[in-house]
């Protein structure tokens, strides 16, 4: 019998391990992978590049449909382009990181990106792992499995700091908490755990342990447990 395409939603705040876990789980299970944060970063990069006033939600809303964002969903080589330009590097700058919460709070931006995410998930024949902030609550509320990753702010800041050469861990923690607060308090589709999501606190787990935990949960779902 053909296996039905499994849809896995992984949400949680910054630095909880969503991207690393999702990529590894998708690779192990032969599923596609979608980093929705990269899409919000990509549209933010476009806004910055086109001189749009980030403090003016109506200016952002007016051009929300302009950028053509294409996400490659191979977990071993995820990619993202805007109007044909590879932006995988530029979307990770401090400037984009500091502006992405404001851009992603604009309802017109969310509507546009949510449509894109749903069409990518629907087209993933072998199933997909989709990671973000509102996947289990809004984008794919019928996902087969929903995971909500958490971790202490200290653990999250230490992990993020490990990626930023020479950064001050306290400044990293402050910036991370500020972004979480903005993402959790916005009106449209805030960062939240879905009622039926499995919460996993990764503070004291290795990445490998988190991956194994999620793989087991997917396999249990597939076995109909
Ligand atoms: N359980 C873990 N223990 C230690 N480090 C981790 C763990 N999970 C992820 N990391 C590391 O923390 C950093 C942030 O992880 P990432 O997957 O990008 O988180 P998110 O997508 O939630 O922001 C990466 O450098 C990753 O290797
Ligand atoms: N589904 C999503 C995914 C991300 N976002 C927004 C909010 C986040 O602060 C930014 C960036 O997300 P991203 O997952 O790249 O952030 P980190 O890897 O945790 O730093 O995008 C969102 O609003 N909804």
Image: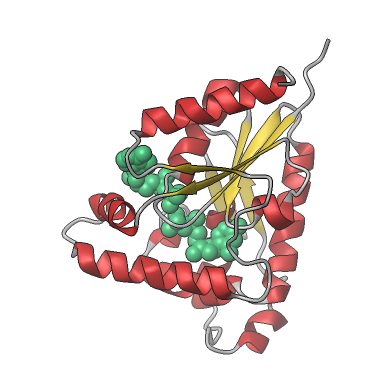
Residue 119 vertical position relative to residue 91 in the rendered view, above or below: above
Q: Residue at image x 69%, y 67%?
A: 110
Q: Residue furthest right?
A: 1
* Side of 150 relative to 7 (left or right): left
Residue sitting at x 67%, y 66%? 189
Q: List the single residue furthest toward the top.
A: 1
Nearest the viewer among 43 and 184 is: 184
Which color scheme does this rendered protein use?
secondary structure
Place of residue 120 in the rendered image (x, y in percent of width and height, measured from the top left): 73, 45
Residue 40 in view = no
Marks counted in the figure total 0
Q: Quadrant of the C terminus?
A: top right
Please identify the quarter of the rendering in which residue 47 is found. bottom right
**Picture coordinates of residue 43 (x, y %)?**
58, 66
**Residue 113 image point, x, y percent:** 69, 61
Q: Nearer the viewer, residue 56 or 218?
A: 218
Residue 52's x, y, as percent? 56, 84
Q: Is residue 114 left or right of residue 134?
A: right
Q: Is residue 11 visible?
A: yes
Pick the quarter of the image with the N terminus: top right
In the image: residue 20, left or right of residue 166: right
In the displayed structure, 15 sits above or below 145; it is below
Displayed quadrant of residue 57: bottom right
Residue located at (68% from left, 72% from top) = 188
Is residue 62 or residue 17 the one in the foreground?
A: 17
Q: In the picture shown, does residue 52 fall above or below 76?
A: below
Residue at 63%, 81% in the rendered image: 60
Between 24 and 151, the one nearer to me in the picture: 151
């Amino acid at each position: 019998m053909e296996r039905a395409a499994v849809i896995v939603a992984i949400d949680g705040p910054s630095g909880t391990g969503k991207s690393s876990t999702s990529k590894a789980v998708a690779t192990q299970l032969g599923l596609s992978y979608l980093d929705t944060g990269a899409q919000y970063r990509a549209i933010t990069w476009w806004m910055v590049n086109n001189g749009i006033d980030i403090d003016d939600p109506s200016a952002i809303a007016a051009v929300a449909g302009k950028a053509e964002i294409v996400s490659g969903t191979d977990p071993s080589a995820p990619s993202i382009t805007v109007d044909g330009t590879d932006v995988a590097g530029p979307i990770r700058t401090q400037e984009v990181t500091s502006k992405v919460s404001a851009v992603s709070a604009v309802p017109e931006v969310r509507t546009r990106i949510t449509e894109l995410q749903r069409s990518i998930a629907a087209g993933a024949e072998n199933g997909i792992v989709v990671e973000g902030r509102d996947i289990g609550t809004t984008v794919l509320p019928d996902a087969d499995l929903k995971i909500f990753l958490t971790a202490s702010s200290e653990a999250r800041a230490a992990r993020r700091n490990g990626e930023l050469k020479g950064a001050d861990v306290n400044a990293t923690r402050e910036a991370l908490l500020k972004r979480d607060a903005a993402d959790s308090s916005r009106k449209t589709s805030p960062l939240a755990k879905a009622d039926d999501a499995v919460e996993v606190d990764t503070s004291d787990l290795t990445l490998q342990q988190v991956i194994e935990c999620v793989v087991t949960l997917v396999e249990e779902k597939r076995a109909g447990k």
